Image (spheres, helix red, strand yellow):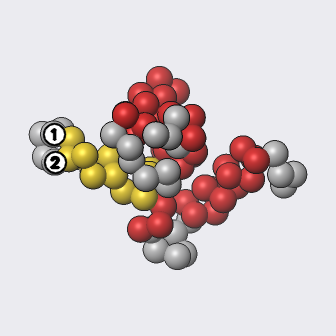
Amino acid sequence: MPRAEEYIAIEAWGRDMGSYPYYIKDQQERAAATNAPLDAIFENVEPGGLRTGVWSTVSELRPDHRFRAVYEKALRVRRGVRL
């Protein structure tokens, strides 16, 4: 089972959206607990805030979606690759 800190896309998405660090950490922990795909970015919710257990992922984004570049940069930074 993946560890919470392995959910790099959730962290990058949250930072990009201006989310608070505690919220990002909570989402990463929830993703790990539910065995979400490693490229998960957020959990889908129904009207009224009911969680669906379905996660949207980077791989589902359009090829030209600007977040793909944000995610690739976050991956490089995490791996220690100089930018």
Label 2 – label 1 distance at C-alpha:
5 Å
Image position, residue 19 (x, y; %): 47, 35
Q: Secondary structure at mark 1?
A: loop
Residue drawn at point x = 87 percent, y = 51 percent:
82
- Badge 1 crowding class, 10 Å Cα cut-off, few under 14, some 14 to 19, many 20 or more, is few
Instruction: Give coordinates of residue 44: x percent, y percent.
Output: 27, 50
Pick the quarter of the image with the C terminus.
Answer: bottom right
* Residue drawn at 43 percent across, 53 percent down: 37
Pointers 2 and 1 in contact (C-beta within 8 Å): yes
Say if 45 sits above or below 62 in the image.
Answer: above
Relative to 9, does residue 5 appear above or below in the rendering?
A: above
Q: In terms of depth relative to the viewer, which is nearer, 36 or 58? A: 36
- Disc 2 marks which amino acid? Glu
Which residue does the numbered mark 2 point to in the structure image? 46
Q: Quick check: 35 left or right of 79?
A: left
Identified at 47% across, 23% down, the residue is 22
* Secondary element type, mark 2: loop
Asked if residue 10 shows in the view, the reply is: yes
- Residue type at mark 1 is Leu
- Kindly identify which numbered label has been placed on residue 50: 1
Residue shown at the point (16%, 48%) measured from the top left: 46
Task: Determine which of the numbered discs, if any, sits on residue 58 in the image.
Answer: none
Q: Is residue 6 left or right of residue 79?
A: left
Measured from the top left, where is residue 56 in percent x and y?
Answer: 36, 56
Can residue 15 be seen here?
no
